[in-house]
Image: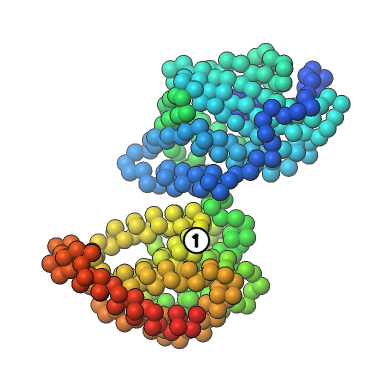
Amino acid sequence: MKFFSYTLSLFILLVLSLPLLGLFIALEETSTYPLNRQLSLEQISSIEDMLIEYDPRYLFNNSDQFIELNEAESNALLIYFSQQLNNYNFDWLTDNTLSIELMPGSAKLGGSFAIKPNLFGRYLNVETSFEQVRNNLILQDLRLGDLKIPSFILRPFLNYSQQVLADNDNYRLLNLMLASIRQFEIKENYLGLTINWTTENFDLVREQARRLLIDETTHNQLITFQNHLTAILNEVPEDIRSISLNALIAPLFSLAMETEGDPVEENQAILLILSSFLLAELEIEDLVGTEAAAATISRPLRVTLEARDDLPRHMIASAAIAAYADNDMANMLSIYKEVHDSRSNSGFSFSDITANQIGTRIGELATEDQNTALQLQRFFAEVALESEYIPLVGRADGISEAEFIAQYGSRSSDTYLNRLEMIEDSIEQLPIFQSL
């Protein structure tokens, strides 16, 4: 894997050596690979799905993880990495692109680097090929434009590029992951990797996943609402162990109304922060990184609706998922909600269905458009009673599958469908949905 690591290092920073190489190579006037490449929505979704699917936190009793990528997924990751390199602010680098072709037992890695125009040319085109020999990738060929580079010239530039990028998080992540690869296999349109996770590269992957899922504006909003939520919770008197969800949503949405941000994005941030607080499986650090350490809740508090602590979790988690319906954040939230639901083990529950449906409706209204989002903020900022947004559902009503069949037969029976219709009618009559 050392050869692979070295060559990727060259791809990333070989352009750093251009002032020296300019005397020895001729740059070109055209790029071999298309520049100005942007991740499509499909590619972004693919990367986020990979981050979720291969999240190492879901490994059990084993630090080894098997990852499978096709050529399209591999190239989506390379485009993302190219964008990170563009953001590195090299004065002489205006754009770059990387591409990989997977073949049986071999791989071809190519790229084009756009630099500031000079007497020698505007583009550095690079191509390299590897061959798999047992569990190693052997460098077969490296070309800069039309020039083939001998290995005795290559090594000094590899060492130099590695030193320059030593403190870059993306490069550190790449090196750590390459060093952690135990086995790999290359076939036509296929790359299989067995990675041994360590604490260091696990933390870096989590940080990169957070940065991809959450942009800077959302990150700042999450910090703002998380700090406010922490302040609200820490102001609850010591003798009180349980509070209504009202005590959280009213001040959070009041704060949103006082700010000048986009109400849709604010609503998303509030629902995401509340989901993180209510679902123990979703750590706030996953959303805002190490800055969450500055906002510490002094003691645990039970948050309820109708004196039940399960209803707020169902409602808020469903609202957050619906609020991010067109964003892959919904996939991540769905996973955490499924983990929570599986742990609750309460059986089939009509009250849970009620809370889920209400949450979904709230999430949809929260992000429908700016006017509706603002109306929702105003409603929750002034909310006084839980009954304004959830009907009386009574005590926990979980039943087993056998009990459900005995009472309702199946999920297509008239008895069951009539019960669902009654729930929907009760939801429609709630003041929140009547007013909006």
Label 1, secondary structure: give it.
loop
x then y, percent, for residue 312: 38, 72
Q: Residue furthest front?
A: 414
Q: Is residue 429 above or below residue 224?
A: below
Write the residue at 34% across / 38% down: 62
Write the residue at 41% across / 65% down: 317
Q: Amino acid at mark 1?
A: Tyr
Residue nearest the viewer, comparing 241 with 253 = 253
Q: Residue furthest bottom?
A: 384
Q: Is residue 359 above or below residue 386?
A: above
Q: Residue 134 falls in which quadrant of the image?
A: top left
Write the residue at 78% across / 19% down: 25
Q: Left or right: where does residue 19 sit relative to residue 223?
A: right
Q: Left or right: where does residue 290 sit relative to residue 320?
A: right
Q: Residue 169 falls in which quadrant of the image?
A: top right
**Camera sees residue 36:** yes
Q: Left or right: where does residue 306 sit relative to residue 182?
A: left
x then y, percent, for residue 308: 31, 75
Write the residue at 44% across / 54% down: 332
**Camera sees residue 176:** no
Q: Residue 161 falls in which quadrant of the image?
A: top right
Q: Is residue 416 above or below residue 285?
A: below
Q: What colouring method underlies this structural image?
A: rainbow
Residue nearest the viewer, comparing 420 with 342 = 420
Q: Left or right: where does residue 337 sit relative to residue 269?
A: left
Which residue is identified by label 1? Answer: 324
x then y, percent, for residue 421: 30, 75
Tell me the crowding category of disc 1: few under 14, some 14 to 19, or many 20 or more residues within 10 angstroms, Cα based. Answer: many
x then y, percent, for residue 31: 72, 29
